[in-house]
Image: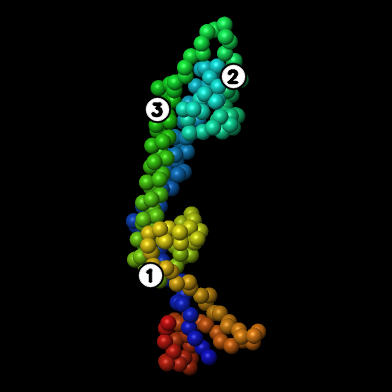
Amino acid sequence: MATTDSPPASGYQPSDQLRACLAAWTKVVKETEPQARGALEAGIAQELRDDRQLTLNVLAQHLPWTAEMLRLLMANRDVPPRERHRQAEGEAPVYTLSERLRDLLAAWNLAVDDEKKARAELERCIADELKAHPALTNAEMAEHLPWSQEQVRVIARAHNVPRRRKRGSDHKLIEENGVPKAVTVPYDWYVQQPGADPAIVRR
């Protein structure tokens, strides 16, 4: 008995809109955010060089990282050891971020927000593309993205995309108790074969 399985891969190519969304997100992830973060880390190192009594614990109170994370970030930035405040020097001054470091922190936070917005827009584009191509599988979409088909499935669910129907392999052997029983083949391939039964239709 011959049956037909799902049609072969669709040959899908991303729309211009999806390409633009992907390019925008990639730029933020690979350029904008890393550059802003690098500048912020350099600014932190300079802050520590300028004030050798400034401890990582105090600095961490003004930043989104722990003192231990700051220690790791500053490991190769030639930051001198911290000096302990001496009681003879009077009360330790209350630390506030320098204007330079505040600006760098604000720029990095803006880059992080831009990445979130670009990611959300990219996911919306992916969902729109899946809705516009009902036969397109998550695996086929994932081939054009830096994510797995499982991540595409998560995105699709979040945007209420109708569930995809999995495509079978080109030819699949069906067995029963270890004995071959049937073979599924792509419909477009089957109808071109000599002796194809016209009663068999695509499903």
Give the label, 1 or 2, closer to the camera: 2
Label for residue 134? 1
Residue 43: x percent and y percent? Answer: 48, 26
Local crowd size for mark 1, using a 10 Å CA cut-off: few (<14), some (14–19), many (≥20): few
SS for dot 3? helix
Residue drawn at the location 65% of the way across and 84% of the way down: 178
Residue 57: x percent and y percent? Answer: 55, 25
Give the label, 2 or 3, closer to the camera: 2
Q: Earlier in the sequence, mark 2 or mark 3?
A: 2
Residue drawn at the location 46% of the way across and 77% of the way down: 6
Residue 171: x percent and y percent? Answer: 54, 79
Disc 1 residue type (three-letter) = Pro
Q: Are marks 1 and 2 in contact (CB under 8 Å)?
A: no
Q: What residue occupies the far right of the structure in this picture?
A: 178
Q: Are marks 1 and 3 in contact (CB under 8 Å)?
A: no
Q: Is residue 29 above or below residue 46?
A: below
Label for residue 103? 3
Disc 2 residue type (three-letter) = Arg
Label for residue 178? none
Local crowd size for mark 2, using a 10 Å CA cut-off: few (<14), some (14–19), many (≥20): some
Residue 176 lies left or right of residue 114; in this view the side is: right
Residue 30 lies left or right of residue 88; in this view the side is: left
